[in-house]
Structure formats: structure tokens, C-alpha cells
Image (tube, rainbow, N blue to C red):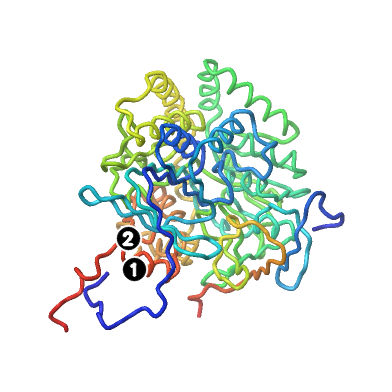
Amino acid sequence: MSGTPPAGPTVTIHADDRTARVPAGISVAAALLELGVGAFRRSVSGEARGPLCGMGTCHECRVTIDGTAHRRSCLILVAEGMRIETGAPSEIAS
Amino acid sequence: MTSTVDASVRIATPPAAAHLTTDVVVIGGGPAGMAATARAAEAGRRVVLLDEGPNVGGQIWRHRARASLGAEARRWLDRLSRSPAEVYHGLAVVDIVPSVGDGPITVVAERHRGGPVDIVHAGALVLATGARERFLPFPGWTLPGVIGIGGAQAMVKQGASFARRRVVIAGTGPLMLPVAATLSAAGARVVLVAEQARASAVRDFALSLLWHPETLAQAALYRLAFLRSPYEFDTWVTEATGRDRVEAVMVSAGRRTRRVSCDLVCTGYGLVPNVELPRLVGCAVAEGAVVVNEQQATSVPGVFAAGEVTGVGGVSLALVEGEIAGAAAAGAVRPDSALVRRRAALRGVAASLERTFAPRAELRSLARDDTIICRCEDVRLASVARLASSRQAKLYSRAGMGACQGRVCGSALEFVLGWAPGTVRPPAEPARLSTLAAAVPSTVDIAASTPTSGH
């Protein structure tokens, strides 16, 4: 997060090559947006994509969470020690 | 499932499945699902509520802290937690199999973070799957930083602040007001709110609300919260530009077009009922919404529907419909007459909302030949424009065959090209192979589909 640490309980997450303390109880998508991440994933033709619907419908906010690919980051809350990988190319890109 | 199942194939480790048997299963934990669940559980039935999000409340009552919610939401949260209903979060329903004869309805769900597959067998089903935003494609709409209007609201409720971002809100409907207010309060700079509807239509709608003064007062409060931002009617965004994220939009008011710099664009053109699961069960759908009777019963025996999925009408209507559906699923012979009267009054408001904020014709032609229509498969308009149906689009271009299963492009193309909705097949959401394998014994009779001649 930018500058001051968040108030209230926090958890530590690892997003790509960054480690950050973020408020407990926020979604992975919200945490990534606050960290300034733009490209959550790459589309099948390589375009940068980020969250669109915010409610689990569009699948644009998919990231890899603790090694599991294609997790909808708007539906999953941050957890202590969570590892998030963004910008992964879509599986059928070639 | 094809008829080529080889009886000699054995799964080494049977996939773990958690089977649950219940009287009533409710899908969706927004206001309608909460009301249905509480009501059915209070009637003494065993009730299981399945919800995709991290906690109950749906989109409108999405929260991290209870204290951030209004009195009505807290009252329903309390009522639900006092009831003996079992609530399961963080899972996606991938399949529903209707009952055969006197058998149960079977719901298959997969947890977002892994674990056993949840298979629920129930006597009655209440579908409270809500609605999603309708996104209309325009050049640049796939850039990061272009998000939904309700999407922005949801992201703020999930913990995003958008502090110091310059925001353009462009779309239609009363949702734009609270979102502008929320973003302003969160520290964003709302530089423009562009409403595509005509000023006269919005004024007539506001006048009709004089019978609902609390709604009008609420709208005025929202407007006060972003009073320093321009709020323009007859205005819409035609294009977003930027390199790997949005940097500006082109804003049109008919003949006049101007460029507005921004870091975030919130766009959405009303709400679309989530009818995929109801259609999977075989429920009749008309004009995009599930058809229900006085009891909120669908065309499929034992299956009820409540809330936005039966037609977009807001939280008050969703609660009333949920209560009626929950009572009916628990076995009530006829609906409570006070609830029935309230439902009729609220449905009138919903119909007038839909007329006022219907997307204008100009929005049909914003996408160009090279504009991506299907965001999951990166299919451009030129690849589908001359096709006749969503089925042809799937066969020839893969549009609608990606992760969202056509939920975004399908709703867009129904408006842009006038197509009818496409077919719905299981799995309703992308699922792990292990989920499908675990669900097989409950959904397909392998013995019946295995050819005996091949042995």
C-alpha cells in the first residue's frame, strides 16, 4: 500500500515479486488494485486485463493463488502468507 | 457423457464429495436468498444456503464490517443467523439436476479454494441468483481501468479505495448516483457522470417517485455527495484510450464529442437477470427473466425463484419475493396476502425504471469491426457481425465459449445484434475435472450409458 500502513488487523501477502501488508478481510482483487496492479491476467491474444464486474461474473480478474490458476480474485479474501501471481497468459494462448 | 465409457477404467482415488441431504436448498445469498432461507428455516425445514461470495448479503448488502450496513440489512443478517439454516460460502454451483419422479433435486458445487465437492440433495430449490450488469462493447472497453458501475461499488466494498483516481462514470440508471457518492467518499475525483437517458425521461421518472418520497430523498442525498462533479444527460462514452490501462475517454452528446482524461471508467447499462442456472434446470424464461406464479414457483415442479432473477426490481421487492418463495418451498399452501400486495406495488416501480433507462439506439453502433466482443476468447465484432445466432457464433468464432460462458458477450450481443440468448449447458462455471468426476455418480447413470456390446 502507498505510504502509511493500514489501520486495524492486517495480513501479509506476496504478489508477484512484492510483499505487502494489507487489511485483513479485503478481497484479493481489491488488494491488487490498491497495490497498483493493472494487468491481472493476459488475454488469449496477449492483452492486459483487469477486473470488470467485481462480482464473479466476468472472470477477467483471474490470477494464480497459492499455485492454483484461474482463481477469481474478486471472490476470494486475502489470507496470511497468500501467494498471488498476476499477468499469467491464458492457457490456450500459443 | 458419451456411450464410450470403458468399464475397465477405474479412478484410482475416488474424488472426495461431501453429500448433504436437505429439505430446501437456496442458491444465492443476497436479500432474496437470505429472506427465502430464513423464512423456510423458521417454518421448521432443514435449509442449506449456497453462496458464491465470501459472506452473505449479495451485491447490495456486500460488507466487510456489519456496522457499515443499514438497519434493514442488519435485521435480516440477524434473522438469518438466528435461524437454524446452514450457510455455505465461497463456492460456485456448476450443475443442477432436476428431480426424476419423487427423487431429489441435486446441486453440485465447487469450493473456490479447493476441498471436497459439495453435492446437495434437496426436496425443493429456491433460485436467488440475482442480476449482473449489462456491459456494452465500445473501442477500448477491454483496457484495465474500465470497470462496471456496480463493479466499482463492489470493489470499494471489498476494500479498494480508488483514492485520488480521476473517475468517469458513464452508463445508465439510478445506480450511478450512489456509486458516484461512494467513490467521492473514498477519495476518488469524479470528473464526470454521463447518463445516456434523456433529461426529460429521467425527470418524468423522478416525478413518478413522488409517491415514494424516501427514494427521492435518498437520490437527492447521493447527488449532494458529488455536487462538485458534472452530471450530464443525453451523454455517453464512445471510446476509451490508453496503453495497457485507460488514460482517457471520448464523450459524446450527439453531434458534439470531447476528450476527458481519467484513470478509471465505470460503465454499465442496467442489470440483466442471471438466468443461466434456472435455464439449466429447465425453468421457463420470458423477456430475460424467470417466469414465476403467485407462489414464486417456476415452471419446474419443486423449483422456486425470487429476487432480480425474476425481473430487476430492487432490494425491497427481492425481500418480499424471497419471503414468499421461502414459505412456499417450506410447504405453505398460499402466499401471505400482505406480502402479495406489497409485491404488486413494488413491481410497478421496476417496470417504470426499465422504460426510463432503456439503452439508446446509438449504443448499438459503438463497437467497430476490430472491437473485441467476446473478452474471454478475444473475438472481434467482424467475426460475428454477419452470423445469425449465438450458436453460429460459438461454432464459427468461439465467441461465448470462454470462462464466463457468454455472460458478458451474450448480453451485449442480444442488444447489439438482436440475437436470442444462447443455450446453457453444464458445467455452468469453469470446473475442475475432479469436480465433474465426483459429480458423475449423482448426475449420470454410468451403467445405463455403458454399451454392453463393447465388452
**Residue positioned most to the top:** B211
Residue B335, which numbered label? Answer: none
Q: Nearer the viewer, residue B228 or B184?
A: B184
In the rendered image, is residue B406 in sight? Answer: no
The amino acid sitting under disc 2 is Leu
Q: Amino acid at mark 1?
A: Tyr
Q: Position of residue A15 (x, y in %)?
A: 71, 68
Left or right: B46, with B174 as reference point: left
Residues at badges 2 and 1 in contact (C-beta under 8 Å)? yes
Give residue B157's quadrant in the image: top right
The residue labelled by disc 1 is B396
Q: Could you tell me which secondary element the residue under label 1 belongs to?
A: helix
Residue at 28% across, 43% down: B284
> Which tag, 2 or 1, sits closer to the chain's start?
2
Counting from the top left corner in percent of width and height, residue A61 is at 58, 60
Percent of width and height locating residue B290: 34, 40
Label 1: few (<14), some (14–19) or many (≥20) C-alpha neighbours in 10 Å:
few
Above or below, comparing residue A28 to residue B395 in the picture: above
Q: Are marks 2 and 1 on the same chain?
A: yes
Q: Secondary structure at mark 2?
A: loop
In the rendered view, would you say B454 is above or below B390?
Answer: below
Residue in view at x 51 percent, y 46 percent: B87
Horizontal side of B319 relative to A61 (left or right) equals left
Question: Badge 2: how crowded within 10 Å, few (<14), some, or many (20+)?
Answer: some
The answer to whether residue B313 is above or below residue A88 is above
Q: CA distance from mark 2 to mark 1?
A: 9 Å
Q: Nearer the viewer, residue B103 or B61?
A: B103
Percent of width and height locating residue B269: 51, 43
Q: Say which chain tag 2 marks.
A: B
Q: Which mark is residue B387?
A: 2
* Residue A87 can be seen in this image: yes
The residue nearer to you, when weighing B155 against B135, is B155
